[in-house]
Image (cartoon, grey):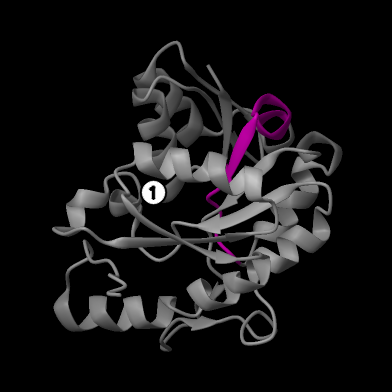
Amino acid sequence: MKKIGVFGTGMVGNAIATKLVQLGYEVMMGSRTPDNEKALAWAKQQGNNASTGTFASAAAFGDIVFNCTQGDVSLEVMKQAGNENLRNKILIDVSNPLLFEPGKRPALMPGLCNTNSLGESIQQFLPDTHVVKTLNIVNCEVMVNASKCGGDATMLLAGNNTTAKASVTELLQQFGWNDIIDMGDITHARSSEMMLPVWLSVYGATKKGFVAFKMVR
């Protein structure tokens, strides 16, 4: 049984960590402090295969680690997790570099689009970690249950290590994703991160969150 660390106690972290426990994995939810109330409540609900800790302890615990934190704090979380704790491990980055300002539509953070991405920035900060960008183009409920969007949607992934991407593909299939496109190295995280404004516009127009993209070819 693989052990998986999950960074983040919000909706995304909760959804992914819960699904992983349901699939039979041992999961540690990581946060800034070892006594985070949301994490403790989650672990109590999930049983013996669920535990909590800091970002550093979750990083050390997991054979695979999910980054489910908000994009504007993700790099700081990686610092707290520690490069050594993530060395030679797979880090699945589902975050997006969205900037939220009062009275404005969410936008991609300056410096993290077109010629860069959050996925690349995390990979640069963690050169000995296998960063794979995926799942960031749908909401958290669709992430862990692909059929919830009502169709056979497409999931994209990008990363530098072929073996790591193969392992992530197996996990995606356990989440119900059958149509998966490997876009290439981690620079292609730019493409999927820049799809978020499209998703937000569609959500704003339809008020439906269970939507996904289908690449017809």
**Residue at image location 64% in from the left, 43% down from the top:** 163
Residue 152: x %, y % from top left: 21, 58
Answer few, some or many: residues within 10 Å of disc 1's Cα (few below 14, many 20 plus, some between 14 and 19).
some
Q: Is residue 193 above or below residue 131?
A: below
Name the residue that disc number 1 marks.
Answer: 11
In front: 153, or 74? 153
Q: Is residue 75 above or below residue 19?
A: below
Residue 139: x %, y % from top left: 33, 59
Whether residue 109 can be seen here: yes
Magenta stretch, residue numbers? 57-71
Examine the structure image and report whether residue 46 is included in the region drawn in magenta: no
Drawn side of residue 16 relative to residue 118, left or right: left
In front: 7, or 146? 146
Label 1: state its secondary structure. helix
- Quadrant in which the C terminus appears: bottom left
The quadrant in which residue 56 appears is top right
Residue 132: x %, y % from top left: 61, 54
Examine the structure image and report whether residue 62 is included in the region drawn in magenta: yes
**Residue at image location 19% in from the left, 84% down from the top:** 205
Say which amino acid is labelled 1: Met
**Residue at image location 41% in from the left, 86% down from the top:** 105
Drawn side of residue 2 relative to residue 130, left or right: left
